[in-house]
Amino acid sequence: DTAVSQTPKYLVTQMGNDKSIKCEQNLGHDTMYWYKQDSKKFLKIMFSYNNKELIINETVPNRFSPKSPDKAHLNLHINSLELGDSAVYFCASSQDGVGRTQYFGPGTRLTVL
Amino acid sequence: GEDVEQSLFLSVREGDSSVINCTYTDSSSTYLYWYKQEPGAGLQLLTYIFSNMDMKQDQRLTVLLNKKDKHLSLRIADTQTGDSAIYFCAPNRKLIWGLGTSLAVNP
């Protein structure tokens, strides 16, 4: 059974569009994260939620909005997509807050044309 | 600001040992992790060390921690082609990640 799943795996879209990426974890974890990995493989934290509450919100354009409907889900909505948003987006989860072992999803490769 | 630095690339021959080094600035982490990312996949936990330890051995993996110098290393004994991946050091209370070290294992 998949522990952390993301959909879609690939997303190709035009500049200016709005898109969402969904993430679900079945590990019973209380903390979830969104990361962006660029073409140089640099991994940067974007957001973190603990028990549906936003606890980390790094310097990210406000076109990016996370939504956590429940502890097991953390979705990422992106408005007005730009070329620079092209990257691989990873969802992750951990138990007992930030700083513990994280379990990563397979990633969503977003390509903005 | 907080930072993690690793060499970008390492190339070894199959059967040799690999040593991947990491320096960091955040000294508040209780756990320091090594994650492995295979091509096209997410990161997976490889091993970790508690901040009050200076060495941990786990089968082919040896982690060394020098807290004074803020230096973490990962040694992989008898490196195999399946070990080819990107390795991320993560002293991770502040969720700072570097660029990782891309390990290439040549037959």
Image: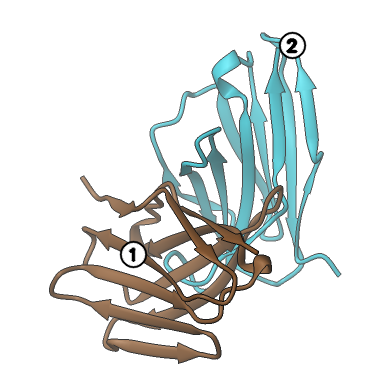
Kindly indicate which chain is depicted in brown in the rendered structure: B
* Label disc, if present, on residue A14 of the rendered structure: 2
- Can you say whether A22 is above or below A50 in the image? above
Residue A106 is tagged as none
Residue at screen point 47% across, 41% down = A42
Q: Is residue A108 left or right of residue B1?
A: right
Q: Which residue appears at 64% of the width and 50% of the height?
A: A91
Tint of chain A? cyan
Circle 2 marks a residue in which chain?
A
Confirm whether residue A31 shows in the render: no
Q: Amino acid at mark 1?
A: Asn
Residues at marks 1 and 2 touching, judged by CB atoms closer than 8 Å = no
Rate crowding at label 1 as few (under 14), some (14 to 19) or many (20 or more) other CA atoms within 10 Å. Answer: some
Q: Position of residue A13 (x, y in %)?
A: 77, 17
Q: Secondary structure at mark 2?
A: loop
Q: Residue furthest left?
A: B68
Instruction: Write down the residue under mark 1.
Output: B21
Crowd band around label 2 with a 10 angstrom C-alpha radius: few (<14), some (14–19), many (20+): few
Residue A34 point in image, percent of width and height:
57, 46
Classify A86 as above or below B35: above
- Disc 1 from disc 2: Cα separation: 40 Å
Image quadrant occupied by the N terminus of chain B: top left
Q: Looking at the figure, which quarter contains the C terminus of chain B?
A: bottom right
A26 displayed left or right of A44 = right
Amino acid type, mark 2: Gln
